[in-house]
């Protein structure tokens, strides 16, 4: 898709079509031709970053208990849906391997060691030489600031928010953030204009309804995160028309 139109980003590894935060979901996003895939990352008991949204295993797997209290070897024995296992960030990086954008959301629960999570994620990115094809996102301001302070120059970092506040704009300016990712349903023209004024990308999540997708396209966002990325493609085709075929 032309990037005059929004980047099409599959949410939690295409959770509308595969178990969330799984390698199967990454493969589905690739098969669908998405521009990027978003994952959630937190630390297990070994200090290894793994793909899971909640701090508990119960909702998305057949396991139970806190992710932070389970070792990687324990986690790989748990079914995350359709026979999929909980991948490590290393697994996800190897699966994507620069073929699309990988958007990594750092999940922070009260009491988590934010510095350890940030350092572990950055270490894996360095090992995979992946900094040029990833974005790092978090709702947690401490995590965003830690990433900004520690990541190599050029690493793209965005603050996740429901809606930007003056404090978010202050953090964005002081730490030279590259984008803001906000809830799509409440997006306003002023918010998009403010991102542009700060020379930042505007992302929206999680936008599943066609009418909301169309509105975000009209407002000129950089990227749309959706459980159903094919709906973004359909909306763009309906509003702008299919890409012209070469003559």
Image: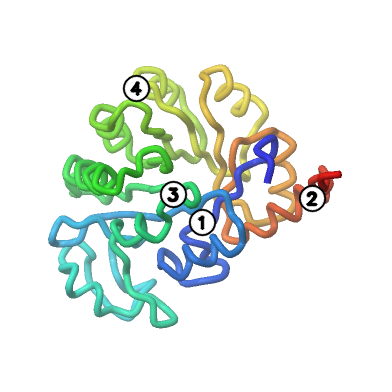
The residues tagged by marks 3 and 4 sit, at their Cα atoms, a distance apart of 26 Å
Mark 2, residue position: 237
Q: Residue at x 20, y 42 (%)?
A: 119
CA–CA distance in space, label 2 to label 1: 20 Å
Q: Position of residue 54 (x, y in %)?
A: 34, 61
Q: Secondary structure at mark 1?
A: loop
User: Is 120 drawn above or below residue 91 in the view shown?
Assistant: above
Query: How dense is the environment of label 2, judged by Cα within 10 Å: few (below 14), some, or many (20 and up)?
Result: few
Question: Is residue 54 visible from the viewing direction of this image?
Answer: no
Q: Tell which tag, 4 or 2, sits nearer the viewer.
A: 2
Q: Residue at x 75, y 55 (%)?
A: 234
Q: Residues within 10 Å of mark 1 (few under 14, many from 20)?
A: many
Q: What residue would you read off at disc 1?
A: 11
Category of crowding for the residue at label 3, using alpha-carbon neighbours closer than 10 angstroms: few (below 14), some (14–19), many (at least 20) = some
Which residue in the protein does label 4 denote? 175
Placement of 118 over or under 211, stated as above or below:
above
Label 2: element kind: helix
In this view, the mark in front (3 or 4): 3
Say which element carries label 3: loop
Q: Is residue 56 left or right of residue 214?
A: left
What number is the disc on residue 132? none
* Mark linked to residue 98: 3
Sequence-wise first label, 4 or 1: 1
């Amino acid at each position: 898709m032309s990037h005059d139109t929004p980047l099409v980003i599959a949410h939690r590894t295409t959770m509308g079509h595969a178990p969330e935060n799984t390698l199967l979901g990454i493969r589905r996003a690739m098969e669908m031709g998405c521009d990027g895939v978003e994952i959630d990352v937190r630390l297990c008991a070994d200090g290894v970053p793994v793909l899971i949204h909640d701090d508990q295993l119960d909702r998305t797997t057949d396991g139970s208990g806190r992710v932070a209290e389970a070792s990687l070897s324990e986690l790989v024995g748990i079914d995350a849906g359709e026979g999929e296992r909980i991948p490590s960030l290393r697994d996800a990086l190897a699966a994507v391997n620069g073929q699309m954008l990988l958007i990594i959301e750092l999940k922070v629960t009260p009491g988590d060691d934010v510095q350890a999570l940030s350092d572990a994620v950055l270490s894996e990115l360095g090992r995979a030489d992946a900094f040029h094809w990833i974005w790092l996102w978090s709702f947690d301001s401490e995590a965003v600031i830690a990433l900004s302070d520690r990541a190599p120059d050029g690493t793209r970092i965005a603050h996740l928010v429901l809606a930007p506040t003056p404090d978010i704009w202050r953090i964005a300016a002081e730490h030279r953030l590259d984008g803001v990712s906000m809830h799509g349903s409440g997006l306003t023209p002023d918010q998009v204009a403010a991102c542009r004024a700060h020379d930042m990308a505007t992302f929206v999540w999680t936008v599943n309804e066609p009418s909301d997708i169309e509105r975000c396209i009209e407002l000129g966002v950089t990227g749309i995160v959706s459980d159903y990325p094919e709906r973004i493609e359909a909306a763009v085709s309906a509003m702008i028309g299919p890409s012209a075929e070469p003559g």
